[in-house]
């Protein structure tokens, strides 16, 4: 554990980092800063360090907790809402700052790559968290299963979030959505060769398909939706056909499949739609723009049940100290203003009907989405993962 802070009362920061056993390094850093204007002086920083129990150090990758000052104090001035977020800071901070500007409610955030469920469980009633924001649906489902969320009764959220993208008991809500699309090489795959997920298993695709692990939650959710629509036997047959068509063993992340198409390893792959935007605009890794340039976008099932979608989402924590402010934050996040901003930050689709996605996202074509409730998908996830093992998709 390492603690450091400067003298003089101007800035005080505390880093806590810990490494624990079990052969794995875990690290946690917390900083909380409160910024106050002091009459007759220039702004000073009054540092306040909030150090969570050392036991929390077992939770990996947690980033600083930061207070974000209200620019124009309003009715919510003095209130604070604390957010635990799986989403990266750059994706969420602009929206949280807009919330503070609108309401005067300050937002503290703790970002984490994993481990928030364990952290919430360990903190129990003492958790400072009011809201959890996740980058995918599986984690919301797990949080609900663990009894860590509280139901929210909100007409605003019910109206803004379509029923298939939220929990039937109001325990979580979709905030943005993404489509599990098929990308194909723009020349090597002719128009009409692929229109459905099932076409990935068709004989004419032999040796032409790339996928990431069949056990990844993105693929498990898709396969679970196929079980719901077509039944288990048909989905098993699909997975067998898919395995027979693979150009290589499942590997890498979504973008690695796009690269493989660009490099001629395969012709088609499954991809979450926002990765197209990330590749198309990647200034740090401009080679990804070339991968993007090799692709064309196919919205599977566009003529039928619609393309499978998943969400990023949010929920109010069971032991929230300020559940009202938490609810207000979620309500703000589905407002027209926030939806446009939030969806565009990660090249996603707004959940709120009538709000358009960004120009880049629109350029890929129109999304006609499968409206199968996410809860139906979650209920079949385990079965879908079992089928992946049964057919040996990853081996
Ligand atoms: Fe992703």
Image (cartoon, grey):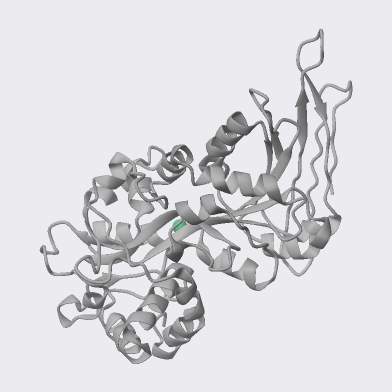
Left or right, 261 with reference to 149 = left
Quarter of the image with the C terminus is bottom left
Q: Which residue is drawn at 80% across and 62% down?
A: 124
Left or right, 253 with reference to 119 = left
Closer-to-camera residue (66/3): 66
Task: Using the rendered view, name the quadrant where residue 392 is placed.
Answer: bottom left
Q: Which residue is drawn at 24% across and 69% down?
A: 301
Q: Where is residue 208 in the image (x, y as percent from the top left)?
A: 22, 72
Residue 175 shows in this picture: no
Q: Where is residue 355 in the image (x, y as percent from the top left)?
A: 36, 44
Q: Position of residue 320 (x, y in %)?
A: 74, 54
Report the residue that reaches farthest toward the right.
Answer: 8
Q: Where is residue 2 in the image (x, y as percent from the top left)?
A: 84, 44
Closer-to-camera residue (239/230): 230
Q: Which residue is drawn at 42% across and 45% down?
A: 343
Q: Is residue 301 above or below residue 235?
A: above
Q: Quadrant of ligand 1?
A: bottom left
The count of marks equals 0
Report the residue that reaches farthest toward the top.
Answer: 40
Task: Using the rendered view, name the quadrant where residue 116 is placed.
Answer: bottom right
Q: Is residue 186 above or below residue 232?
A: above
Left or right, 265 with reference to 332 = left
Residue 51 shows in this picture: yes
Q: Is residue 253 above or below residue 249?
A: above
Left or right, 332 with reference to 368 = right
């Amino acid at each position: 554990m390492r603690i450091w802070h400067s003298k003089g009362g101007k800035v005080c920061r505390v880093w806590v980092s810990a490494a624990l056993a079990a052969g794995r390094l875990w690290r946690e850093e917390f900083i909380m800063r409160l910024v106050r204007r002091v009459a007759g002086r220039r702004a000073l920083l009054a540092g306040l360090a909030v150090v969570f129990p050392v036991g929390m150090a077992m939770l990996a990758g947690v980033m600083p907790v930061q207070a974000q000052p209200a620019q124009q104090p309003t009715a919510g001035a003095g209130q604070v809402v604390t957010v635990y977020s799986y989403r990266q800071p750059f994706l969420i901070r602009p929206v949280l700052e807009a919330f503070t500007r609108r309401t005067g409610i300050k937002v503290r955030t703790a970002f984490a790559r994993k481990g928030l469920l364990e952290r919430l469980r360990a903190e129990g009633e003492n958790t400072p968290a009011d809201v959890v924001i996740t980058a995918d649906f599986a984690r919301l489902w797990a949080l609900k299963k663990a009894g860590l969320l509280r139901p929210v009764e909100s007409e605003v959220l019910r109206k803004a979030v379509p029923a298939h993208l939220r929990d039937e008991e109001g325990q979580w809500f979709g905030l943005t959505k993404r489509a599990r699309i098929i990308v194909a090489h723009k020349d090597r795959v002719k128009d009409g060769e692929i229109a459905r997920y099932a076409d990935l298993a068709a004989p004419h695709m032999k040796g032409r398909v790339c996928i990431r692990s069949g056990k990844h939650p993105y693929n498990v959710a898709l396969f679970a939706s196929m079980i719901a629509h077509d039944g288990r036997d048909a989905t098993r047959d699909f997975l067998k056909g898919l395995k027979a068509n693979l150009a290589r063993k499942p590997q890498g992340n979504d973008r690695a499949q796009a690269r493989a198409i660009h490099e001629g390893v395969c012709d088609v792959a499954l991809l979450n739609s926002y990765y197209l935007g990330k590749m198309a605009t990647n200034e740090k890794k401009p080679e990804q723009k070339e991968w993007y340039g090799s692709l064309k976008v196919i919205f599977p099932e566009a003529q039928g049940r619609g393309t499978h979608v998943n969400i990023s989402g949010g929920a109010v924590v069971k032991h929230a100290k300020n559940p009202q402010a938490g609810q207000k934050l979620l309500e703000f996040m589905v407002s027209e203003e926030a939806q446009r901003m939030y969806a565009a930050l990660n090249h996603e689709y707004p959940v709120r009907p009538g709000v358009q996605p960004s120009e880049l996202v629109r350029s890929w074509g129109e999304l006609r989405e499968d409206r199968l409730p996410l809860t139906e998908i979650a209920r079949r996830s385990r079965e879908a993962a079992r089928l992946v093992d049964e057919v040996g998709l990853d081996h």
